[in-house]
Image (cartoon, helix red, strand yellow):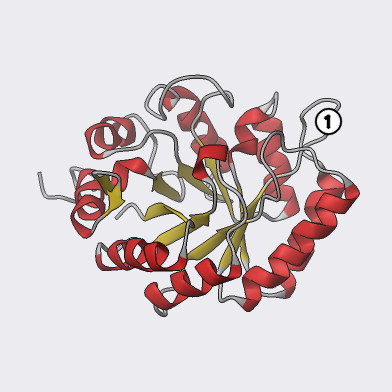
Amino acid sequence: MIPIEICIEASEAAAVERAVSAAFHGDAATIELCAAMHLDGLTPSPACLTAARQAFRQRPGLMAMIRPRAGDFCYTPAELALMLEQIDAAAAGGADGVVFGVLHAADQRIDRAASRDLLAAARGHGLKTTMHRAFDATPDPDATLDALIELGFDRVLTSGLPWGQPGTALDGAERLAQTIGRAQDRIEVVLGGGIRPANVGPLLARLPLHIGRVAVHAYSGAQIAGQTTVEAVQLLAAAATPRTQAGI
């Protein structure tokens, strides 16, 4: 089965609890909890994280976004210090993992030194680590993937398209296939970017799923009328089931 990750907006605790509960009962493998989705996701509040943890129960898949502000992915020393504090807070709130990405302002390549500091903080709490779609903002995805594997990231979220370019992960299928092939099961590749029941099947059919670990990430594609529901999550999961596994 292809693991399903549902992105949940951390607006206020009661709404988070309802959405995460729906994802839980829809059998989502992981949750990515983000505040301010209109800004492409920021660090959630402690109250929202606590609500998410309660709703996702003991399932080990609650991932917290660590992004202190909107805009680019190039952070000042003060912002990096805040990110370290936010990782500590995520662990204290019951997160199982954190999601972040730091790039150099000069060339948009991954900032290895800053990444090592953040990874060390996460590992100190036993948290899994995902690089978010800052990956898609780097100029050389292959070199970035190699760096992530060398640094020890557990997962990478990518659409296969350059950051800011219109389109969905289906449009980025060729690049995603290359990324999965290069990863060779050394890092989980999480497919994200406009994923929904209508396009996830055609996307997966174009990818070498036998080579390594792949998951599917969705936000609005797991919603009905703007709300995350059990039915929407189950529809996505069913559509993401490879045809051979579905017995077709």
User: How would you rate the neighbour count of disc 1 (Cα within 10 Å): few for under 14, some for 14-19, many for 20 or more?
Assistant: few
Q: Position of residue 19 (x, y in %)?
A: 34, 61
Task: Give the camera-side residue of 137 and 242.
Answer: 137
42 left or right, relative to 2: right
**Residue that extends furthest to the right in the rendered view of this protein:** 77
240 left or right, relative to 32: left
Number of labelled discs? 1
Quarter of the image for residue 182 reads top right
Q: Given the image, on which type of amino acid does mark 1 rest? A: Ala
| Above or below 117: residue 108 | above
**Residue at 38% in and 74% down:** 55
Q: Secondary structure at mark 1?
A: loop
**Residue at 71% in and 32% down:** 143
Quarter of the image for residue 117 reads bottom right
**Residue at 69% in and 75% down:** 125
183 left or right, relative to 76: left
